[in-house]
């Protein structure tokens, strides 16, 4: 059933396989929460809207999802219904989903953490580095801990989303022989004697930015990855299971949730929290200064950055 949903989604607006798999997985889990049995068709999506809403909202019988997860669940319902050609039913969920989008935008416009839970997930660079040191000082690491360490090391300088999941390791010569369609099929780590490159083809904003290459220039990260590949010459994926299979996005989320708790007083964090921590540590002071100056100049921070702030003295 999941595969059928994915095929419908991929034919709808040429959705990429990774996105289709994510939406399909959401629908499978939604059905499981509502009916507690395997999904055999999609008729249930249009039969009882109240049940669908409750399943999208409730994590368990007594625990609710946060509004962002509720929103994401609703979005998956909308996407699947539209792929089936049922726009009328999909539209019944759009208003609520969009209200959550507006709330997210308004909440984050304050420039502050939304609650204590978010604040507890924040890492200073010192705390981040201390976690890495603790992991590197261990004589042996479990598979989960090794994957967690790889994420912590790479994200310390290159704060991606969960794009390392399912990332294939490939040589530059082999990569260059791939067709454009093959290059767009998954994220890859290109290695050769001198350079290392992260190639993102399957990621959240790929529709706008397309295939993106990120050169690994940080000496510490290059040294870490060189040793990782040297110690594991048969490694095929940046993050992988103990059976050598690629770690899925879900597997990455579980890894981050389980291992991070051990180093953050029982509070888990994921790649989104790492991105927020990185950007806050790196740019919060600059943001405060821009806000202060925006008041003097009489315009918004965005205007100050896009119109008045130049990268250099060159002429277009």
Image: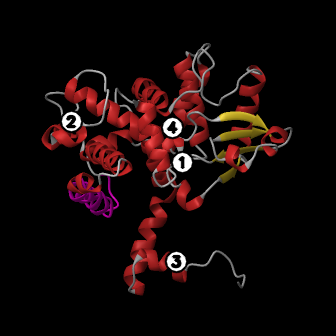
Magenta stretch containing residue 125, yes or no?
no
The answer to whether residue 310 is above or below residue 155 is below
Q: Residue at x 57, y 42 (%)?
A: 156
Nearest the eye: 51 or 149: 51
Q: Earlier in the sequence, mark 2 or mark 3?
A: 2
Determine whether label 4 and label 3 are within 8 Å by CB: no
Does label 1 or label 4 sit earlier along the sequence?
A: 4
- Dot 2: element: helix
The first of marks 1 and 2 along the sequence is: 2
Mark 3, Cα crowd under 10 Å, few <14 / some 14-19 / many 20+, is few
What is the quadrant of residue 243 in the picture? Answer: top right
Residue drawn at the location 51% of the way across and 45% of the way down: 161
* C-alpha distance separating marks 2 and 4: 36 Å
- Label drawn at residue 55: 2
N-terminal of the two: label 4 or label 3?
Answer: 4
Q: Tell me the distance, in whole angstroms, between the alpha carbons under discs 1 and 2.
A: 27 Å
Query: Which comes sooner in the sequence, label 2 or label 4?
Result: 2
Q: Which residues are magenta?
A: 93-113
Residue 217 image offset from top left, x and y in percent: 73, 48
Q: At 51% across and 75% down in the image, what residue appears?
A: 305
Alpha carbon of mark 1 to alpha carbon of mark 4: how far?
25 Å
């Amino acid at each position: 059933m999941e595969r059928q949903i994915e095929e419908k989604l991929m034919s709808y607006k040429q959705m990429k396989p990774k996105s289709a798999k994510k939406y399909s997985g959401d629908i499978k889990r939604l059905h499981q929460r509502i009916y507690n049995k395997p999904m055999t068709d999609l008729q249930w999506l249009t039969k009882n809207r109240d049940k669908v809403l409750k399943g999208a909202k409730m994590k368990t019988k007594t625990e609710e999802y946060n509004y962002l997860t509720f929103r994401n669940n609703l979005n998956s319902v909308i996407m699947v219904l539209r792929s089936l050609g049922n726009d009328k039913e999909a539209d019944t969920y759009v208003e609520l989903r969009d209200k959550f989008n507006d709330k997210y935008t308004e909440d984050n416009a304050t420039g502050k953490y939304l609650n204590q839970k978010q604040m507890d997930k924040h890492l200073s660079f010192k705390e981040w580095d201390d976690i890495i040191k603790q992991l590197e000082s261990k004589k042996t690491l479990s598979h989960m801990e090794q994957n967690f360490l790889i994420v912590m090391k790479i994200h310390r300088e290159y704060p991606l989303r969960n794009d390392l999941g399912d990332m294939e390791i490939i040589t530059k010569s082999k990569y260059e022989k791939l067709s454009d369609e093959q290059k767009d099929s998954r994220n890859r780590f290109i290695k050769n004697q001198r350079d290392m490159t992260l190639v993102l083809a399957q990621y959240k904003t790929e529709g706008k930015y397309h295939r993106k290459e990120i050169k690994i220039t940080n000496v510490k990260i290059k040294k870490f990855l060189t040793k990782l590949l040297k110690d594991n010459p048969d490694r095929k994926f940046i993050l992988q299971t103990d059976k050598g299979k690629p770690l899925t996005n879900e597997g990455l989320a579980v890894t981050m949730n389980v291992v991070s708790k051990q180093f953050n007083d029982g509070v888990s964090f994921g790649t989104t929290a790492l991105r927020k921590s990185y950007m806050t540590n790196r740019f919060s002071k600059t943001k405060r200064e821009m806000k202060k100056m925006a008041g003097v100049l009489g315009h918004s921070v965005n205007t100050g950055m896009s119109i008045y702030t130049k990268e250099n003295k060159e002429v277009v």
